[in-house]
Image: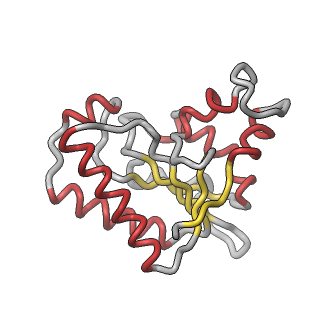
Amino acid sequence: MRRGEDRVHPEPDRDSRTLCAVLLNPALRPAPETISFRNLGCALPLMGCDRLRLANLLDVPSKDQDRLGAAVIEESDVLRSRKLLAEAVAAADEILFAWGSNRVTGQVGARLREQAEWLRRHLREEGVRRVWMVAGSPRHPSRWRQYVGPEKARVEGSTFEERLAKVLAVHSLE
């Protein structure tokens, strides 16, 4: 996510509900051009939402996980990311953990695990008791179609949305 590229609809209204999807880190290209953004758009109605806001465990753009893993993450990056995360989840009606299930190694991997634990603590402190995930893990939206694809035979349904609805569920933070 880049600041200013986080919403599906620019104008909120009283009946609007916002989903905050917490991803790993921003892509180098605009969010609306990504597979993740399109897949998240399909998930919005399944969660009773019509607006999307993206947030990231680390607000450090990279081409892929390998490049992120090689990046130097400063304490200022961590603190800025926490501020942006706190703002994003405070403005959300629903929260989706979607940073991916692959582990980044090394110093950056340790920072990411710290960020995920900080986010869980922060949400509990704010009274949030549940979040959404796909198949019980923070599976990245760019991988959803592979996960629920008919060739994998994990989930039955004639459309991506039908199959996604069967694995997209609320999970307790407790």
Residue 25 seen in render: yes
- Asked if 134 appears above or below 149 in the picture, the reply is below
At 46% from the left and 41% from the top, the residue drawn is: 100
Residue drawn at (70%, 76%) of the image: 14
Percent of width and height locating residue 128: 53, 74
**Depth order, front residue of 34/171:** 171
6 to 150, vertically: above or below = below
Residue at the limit of the structure toward the front, as seen here: 174
Residue 11 is at least partly visible in this image: no
Q: In which quarter of the image is residue 81?
A: bottom left
Q: Which residue lies furthest to the top in this view?
A: 151
Please state which of residues 31 and 95 is positioned toward the viewer in this rendering.
95
* Count of picture labels: 0
Rendered residue at 55%/68% (across/down): 92
Left or right of 102, for residue 164: right
Residue at the image point whose x is 52% and y is 34% from the top = 33
Using the image as rendered, state which of residue 151 and residue 91 is in the foreground: 151
**With 138 as the anchor, is 63 left or right in this view?**
left
Q: Answer left or right for 142 relative to 1.
A: right
Query: Which x, y percent locates residue 25?
Result: 36, 45
Residue 173 in the image, given as x and y percentages of width and height: 52, 67
Query: In the rendering, at what x and y percent does residue 147 appear?
Result: 63, 31
Give the colouring mode of the picture. secondary structure
> Residue 147, relative to residue 85: is it above or below?
above
